[in-house]
Image: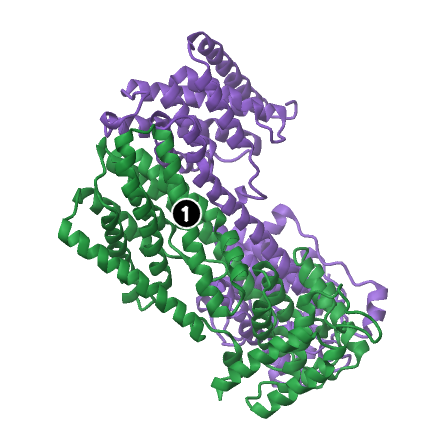
Amino acid sequence: MRELPRNARLVIVTVVAASLGLSIFAIGQIQQWLPILVFAVLYVLADSLPVGPGTRTAGLTITVTTPVAIAAYIVLGIWGGVLVAVASVCDVTRIAPVKRVFNAGQLVIAVAAGGSIYALLGGTSTLDPSSFPKVLIPALVSGVVYAFINSLLVGVVIAIVEDASSIRLLRDILLRTLLPGVAYSALGMVLAVLWTQVGPLALAFGLLPLFVARWAMGQFAAEQQAYSATIRSLVQAVETKDAYTRGHSERVARASVLIGQAMTISDDRLQALEYAGTLHDVGKLGVPTTVLRKSGKLTKEEFEAIKLHPTRGHDIVRDIRFLDEALAGIYHHHERIDGLGYPSGLKGDQIPEFARMIAVADAFDSMTSTRSYRSARSVDEAMDELLICRGTQFDPQMVDALIFAVSQVGWEPAKPPTADELIAQQGGPVFDDDDPLVAEPRAVAIGEQRAESESVQRQDGVRP
Amino acid sequence: MTTLEAVRPRSGSHEAGLTASVLLAVAALIVTVISLCATAIGGVRQPLIALAFGVFIGVGAFLRLRLPGDREVWPVATAGALAYSVLPWFGGVKAEHAAYQAVTVTAVAMVLGMIPHVIASRLPALDLMSRQILSVALAAFLFRPLWVYAEGQSFPAWQISLIMVAVCILALLADAVMASVVRAAKTRAPFLRTLGDELQAGLGLNSAVAATAVMISMTSSAMAYWSLPVFALQMVLVQVAFKRYAMIRSTYRQTIRALSRVTEVGGYTETGHARRVCDISLAVGREMGMAETDLLNLEYAALMHDIGQLSLDDPIPGGATVVAAPYQQRQIAEKGADVIVQTGVLDEVARIVRHIPDPYRRPQEAADLSVPLGSRIIRAVNAFDDLVGGSLEGSRRYEALERLRLGMVYDFDPKVVETLSRIVERNTSFAM
């Protein structure tokens, strides 16, 4: 509690005090305790059932408890509902006491608000054929009010703690109010009907579909994590062929995500971008180790083989259906804004957005990594180099985005290979296709000599 | 036709599977026609209620969903159809429709809901529809006569809802039995195995379907038409959750399939080798009665069995591990397994890959039981494919099989070789 900002503490204390007052008043209003107990037990059970990892990260959060709370104030009235909300303190999941008390407190206030609106608009506690459709308006409106208070109180505290902007706070609150409010109050109403028509046992039954949905979302989240882990480690494992480029794909994925975040693309696309970054060099994995590690000059054929890697990578992953946008990113990540890249020689906006992001991330990681023919550049030097190529090789927007992101969160560059690793692999690549400090496909295509002389000039230019 | 297609057990390609589907469709058609006639003669009772449920079922049939394991479902339609079959009251009035009317409404709505798919030239879910009509008929003919009787005795509501729950569960079980009969016939897997898989795979979604069906009927006694949109909403929520899950599962499979090509692109293995080994191994595993979870591990292991070759400096000529030295075979398997272990979620797959070079048994010793069945299958199928390659020649296939049979005493599991021969012989007969 001490480490919370002062304003957050103020809100929490106010909420808890107000809810305490409401609860004490509620105790005096109750004649029948048994129904309240049944609802309270159901609420705590619904709150405590395990749902698997990462349900929150999955984008679609399904709450089982909200319909129970709404059904509680419909069936038990305001004061009964308030006491059910108090019982939520008994949540068996391990959360900090402050959070636990605040959660119960804001729930008490939301239930009291929802219950009052429901009663004010003429909602009844028993729902039979005569109460439809006139109970619909009170139920839906009170549900929206409930959801509003709930997301407002939680949102304000989170916004204060995380120092978020008020616009984002407002957007989050609206997002969590209207649609969920209507949906959950409809489900709460159904639970209330079941209570009246069939009896208390039907309540547990009524929650089953929501539990199943939540379980499926949990499975989805677990599977998604497994998926990321799998492609990351498979790609990484086959990368170990070359001590110099080890971890390259993962770092490119990380840098691409930084760029994507700075460009504020949606969560789904960010996920796809991460996959694209991870898989961007998958075509290189199949290049025989002898070619990759050859010390001495590459023949023209060998260089052409390496140039083929975006096409090969595309061939490998094109059957993965969901990767649509990521696929274009992989295929075109060696295009240049001035149209001199490969494989298609696209220009400017013709190059898919993902490819423009990955190109910058790719070059950035290559420059900040050690190569057999040069030492690693510092992050600042690499950013200067990106600025030089801004608008010719790279999309200016993406360069700015990466520089902005790195200045905000920093960057942990690749570690140079250890001596043991180098002895183990005997020699290293003479050439890195991703490296803007040497890779000039245009020049290499004309003659290797010129490529080398240009690269020397370029390196001199960067040196302080 | 390539070998790949010839050997892959395609759905419907087996006569037994086709027969099962046709029988099911005929049974469903008979039930539908009888119900239609009865409805035409007796007239539709409470047509507005029938229409409301018909719309619910029709929309649900439009929202098809493919679950992992190639299972087509339409949970919204199933829930609606079952709810209409076991409907006791509606808006304070007794539901008077007979069982045949419930079947008629279900069948008509499902056909209408499928029309947009047919227009978009997607395959209609004929198996699914036949099964659903039959299981809904079971529920309706069990419950509706009982309801007439029960109402005379005036049972309390909770007892009636228990009966409704039982009827719905029975109908869903019947559906699972029919689905596994068809699947067993199509894939030649043992029936009890497919039934087990079916029940396991459907448990989560079907419990939601049964609960929703009963709740729709119970709440619509008070809420009348208002309960339908509420539960439609809830079921769509359930469906979205399952759809996301199914999508990431299929992405995972596609990705492993795609990454298995890395060795081919690099010239380490022959084009299509990993996929061929995978498809044939799956056919063998299925016919030997492996469970679905084990089959998935077998699939991944077969696809990635050569991934260890990437650690070799130079490709083995032709990528055929069957001609590589035993030491090298073991090295490839070990490296591959090490790579797979690093994912943190595929331990069983890594175990299978690690044991591929292990012979079925060593001289003077009993069969080595620590070698997983998956490894034994991949070992034999890999050798078969290395010897045959993509060749379509019958003689090469028989030579390869002969060589496997010779190695049966020690190298290869006789049961695996037997099953493999059956599959190869069966498929060559109509591939040539």
Q: Position of residue B330 (x, y in %)?
A: 78, 73
Query: Who is closer to the viewer here, B216 or B254?
Result: B216
Disc 1 marks which amino acid? Leu
Q: Which chain does the residue under circle 1 lie in?
A: B
Query: Who is closer to the viewer here, B144 or A406?
Result: B144
Query: Who is closer to the viewer here, A447 or B420?
Result: B420
Please determine whether, in this image, residue B42 is positioned above or below residue B339. Answer: above
Please determine whether, in this image, residue A248 is positioned above or below residue B384. Answer: above
Q: Is residue B116 visible?
A: no
Residue A122 picture quarter: top left
Q: Position of residue B175 (x, y in %)?
A: 41, 54
Q: Residues within 10 Å of mark 1 (few under 14, many from 20)?
A: some
Chain ID, green in image? B
**Residue on which the image places disc 1:** B170
Residue at x-position 54% and y-position 21%:
A12
Q: Is residue B59 visible?
A: yes
Residue furthest to the top in view is A28
A199 left or right of A256?
A: left
Q: Position of residue A199 (x, y in %)?
A: 39, 26
Please determine whether, in this image, residue B394 is positioned above or below residue A372. Answer: below
Chain ID, purple in image? A
Q: Position of residue A36 (x, y in %)?
A: 45, 19
A284 left or right of B135?
A: right
